Image (cartoon, helix red, strand yellow):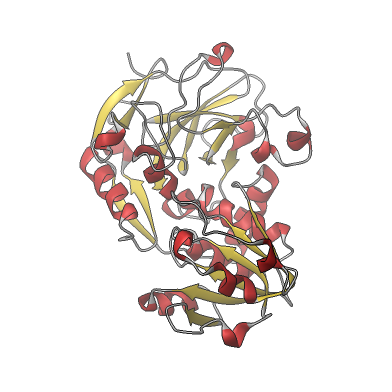
Amino acid sequence: MGYPDTFEGFMVQSQKDWTTFKKQEFKPKKFQDRDIDVEIECCGVCGSDVHTINGGWGNAPMPLCVGHEVIGKAVKVGDNVTTVKVGDRVGVGAQIWSCLKCKPCKTDNENYCPDKIDTYGAPYPEDMGGVIAQGGYASHIRAHEYFTFKIPDNIPSHEAAPMMCAGLTTYSPLLRAGVGPGKKVAIVGIGGLGMYALMWASAMGAEVYALSHSPNKKDDALKLGAKEYISTNEKDWDKPYMFAFDFMLNTADATHEFDLAKYMGTLNINGEMHHVGLPDKPLPPIMAQMFAPNGCKMGGSHIGSRPEMFKMLKLASEKQLKPIIETLPVSEANCATAVTNVDKNKVRYRYTLVDFDKAFPSR
């Protein structure tokens, strides 16, 4: 049928065949008075896309169109939309709806709403159409106004796209931890999340240290804002940094292989090791006694809030921060290439799928 009745996307049919994408139509949620239809210009490729389609995070509804780092043009707005108008360049991240009525929602913590709807793979209730939410490897996306964000003019779309998930996921915990001048911050893992964490923490005025087992990433880490690069492959790497860090943001996808006691021992008194990497495997065993030597703590978080998204975009715009991004024209073959390379850590440091006009010429 075509837009607005159906959208078109590159979809995976089975988790057993997760690198095979087929271009096909799907039905979006019912259009409501605070919804916005976005004609997609580009979409980032997130580790979440891979964990979802390959079964690492469990079963997912199929067929599925992933992608939750969307940039595009608003082409239709609901009658009660006040923050976006037709023609605006906007972004959509990893969350597409919440109740906006519960305690978390009323305290700018809508990312923890118990009834939240993820941008893809989540069921809409019957009064919204009863369909499964589909993501941004697609011609269009339909999003609630509260989860649609105007993009500053000086941030290119292909750079803005990964900020919608990877950017916010790392910015929010740094902001909530009070990262800024006078703070020493460790970023663990220099990949698609760690790149943004280094960039944000440095721009916020902290003294930043990059911790990684990949020596070939040292130069990039320093360019992104790290004062020092620490190779965690070296024996006793932690000894010179005992009690050094006020906050540690772990962005790695291999935490199950960590000697957590070493990482925790580098934290200052009451410092925090905070996890935003969400690997397929569980954390190593943890004893309560591991927290005693420095009174440290451990936590985690899920993306961020609407106010935090706008603060992050303002920081990126005003300081003209430049992430390291590779682009690929969106297609069945390149969707497969992108998710395969993300799975194998063969990307520097995020992919953005582009050229959607060529992929969806009839929209």
Against 211, residue 133 (above or below) is above
Residue 204, percent from left and from top: 66, 68
Relative placement, left or right, of 288 versus 40 is right
Residue 26, percent from left and from top: 36, 21
Could you tell me if residue 202 is visible in this image?
no
Relative placement, left or right, of 212 versus 359 is right
Find the residue positioned furthest to the left: 333
Residue toward you, 291 or 300: 291
Q: Residue at x 47, y 44 (%)?
A: 69
Residue toward you, 119 or 243: 243
Residue 132, percent from left and from top: 45, 22
Number of marks in the rendered image:
0
Could you tell me if residue 84 is visible in this image?
yes
Residue toward you, 230 or 133: 230
Against 120, residue 211 (above or below) is below
Check the picture and name the quadrant holding the C terminus. Answer: top left
Check the picture and name the quadrant holding the N terminus. Answer: top left
Q: Residue at x 45, y 51 (%)?
A: 281
Q: Residue at x 58, y 52 (%)?
A: 168
Find the residue positioned furthest to the bottom: 240
Q: In which quarter of the image is residue 177?
A: bottom right
Residue 203, percent from left and from top: 62, 69
Residue toward you, 93 or 234: 234
Relative placement, left or right, of 231 versus 264 is left
Against 102, residue 170 (above or below) is below
Q: Residue at x 34, y 46 (%)?
A: 353
Against 42, residue 1 (above or below) is above
